[in-house]
Image: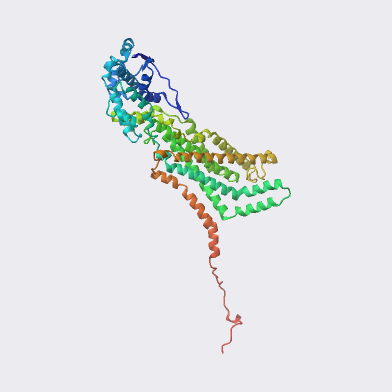
Amino acid sequence: MVERKFQLIDKYVFNRTYHGIPLSEQWQAWETAHFFRVKSIIDNPSVAARLISYGCNNGDPSTLNCTTTCSNATLMYSLPENLWNCMTLATLGMLVGPGNDTIDRGSEMKMDEIFHFGTVEKFNRLNVFRKARDCAWASCSDSTYGHCTGSLQRFKCNPVSPTNIESFGNVMAKPYCQAASAGIDLDIAGQGIVSAYIIQLVLVLFLSICFKLTASWIRTFGRISSSVQKGSSFRETCNQWQTRLGQTRFANATSAAMSDFQESQALFAATISITAIITFDGGNRAGLANMLTLFSWMFNHRILQGLITAGMYPVLMAQLVMHRAGQRRFYTLFFVVLSWVLMTIITEFQDFNAAEFEQHLKQVSNVGACGNMPGPMSFCQGIKDRDSYEFFTLTLASRFAVHIIISSLIIDWAVHLANKRLSGGKIKYAQIGGETRSLFAFAETKGIKLFLGVFWAAVELLTVSLIFIGLREMVELLDMHQADGGLSTWGFGQLVAVAIWFPIMIKFISLNIVGPKKEVKQLEQVQRPQALELDSYSYNKANDTHIRPVM
């Protein structure tokens, strides 16, 4: 037998985070009220049960009334502090009324003066646990949120009693939320979307290898070999091979495909980033229709942060390759920088607006048994403890590298522009670290050019490493939920996302087969039969000495 007491608190301090996302106190209060109040009171009999000083708000600003609030499901589930106080009083009422515990009547009387609930025995007659049981079952029965854990089955029809209240508290504290769905939006992290990003990463690696091979690798290999073997003619041979390869149909197809690919993916990255900002903006509910739980918002936002960050890697790789070959296009760099700015906003400055999202849930995630308020499944956060839901850890941790690469590209373009303008267009600043004249005299020394060559090679290797990290973590995302059947639904939007890169690949293949338009025209002219045209001139029969006389 335990004597129970009350304690009045003005605020409960919460400081939990999920992957660096601070969880608001309001949402942690919802989680605690739904899942942990019963277990906490039962497991800590010597600790006074805490009541929040502003709980049991029934709409009357002058009087707090737990009897009125807790007898109405809509009022009880309207505010986390209301649910907190109702579950606290209901737990003590069950333990003291039909149970064997006692209550400190002095403490009870003080709380009754504030919250007007009478005695805990009287409060127990309000059947708060029946409302909580019906609400919990109705919330998890909707397949949108997941499924009901088997341990809750016994409470579907049987009431909560002093003999099973501890079991009910344990079920709500852990197994209930472990059965919750992550609420992944297939338009954000469906198999088609992730597959499109994987194709993009693989495609940029393939095109970059082809582009570097036709533009510089053979020449660079010859330069390195000649530095080892002095007086060797191998360098000149490599230069000739590089020149010949750069004039082939394969080289032209690679250059055209790389240019088109960079334009497409830069626009794609910017579009996805803008859409993400609109979707997860606290003051805008556009795009949130498929997010019906708190964890759904956090999980989808986390995945989208990783996808957008990893989606920057192929954009940077293509831009690096083009810069190294002297192909600096302002409009592609502009979209690259724009995508970088948007990525920074999403990963660094976009916060969770708890109040706005709660209003969203009250509109799209209401449960009748919960007074047409969001049910407990909407506030489940226990799924975050699963190791299988840890995605893009390395990608997001290494996003600082994107800032370094972007800064290098901007500086390179600025130096190129300044050099071009100051030289009046007469001197071309071509390949970085190459044998070119420049107004920047310090960059013409052998040591500086060697440093620049090594620096940009290191930047390219860094980008390639990031691409492989992104590939690995995207494959892990595709393997998600394999034990539960996986994400097998492919929507129309996902098919479109995968097909977005097909035109680039088709163009690359066709250019390798038939060649560019100019080459096709030249080939047609060569194969066309020549038509001989006679010039008009006056004919004089007397001048024709080859006419035979008429016999």
Outermost residue to the right: 231
Number of numbered callouts drawn: 0
Using the rendered image of the protein, determine whether residue 445 is visible from the camera's viewpoint: no
Position of residue 532 in the picture relative to residue 445 (left or right): left
Using the rendered image of the protein, determine whether residue 215 is visible from the camera's viewpoint: yes
Q: Position of residue 249 (x, y in %)?
A: 56, 55
Q: Position of residue 345 (x, y in %)?
A: 48, 33
Relative height, residue 384 to residue 477 (above, below): above
Say which of 414 and 475 sits in front.
Answer: 475
Which residue shows up at 39% across the image and 43% down it?
A: 488
Position of residue 126 in the picture relative to residue 397 (left or right): left
Which quadrant does the C terminus fall into? bottom right
Relative height, residue 168 to residue 447 (above, below): above
Which residue shows up at 41% across the image and 44% down it?
A: 494
Which residue shows up at 53% across the image and 68% down it?
A: 529
Outermost residue to the top: 106
Q: Position of residue 191 (x, y in %)?
A: 43, 42
Q: Position of residue 403 (x, y in %)?
A: 55, 35
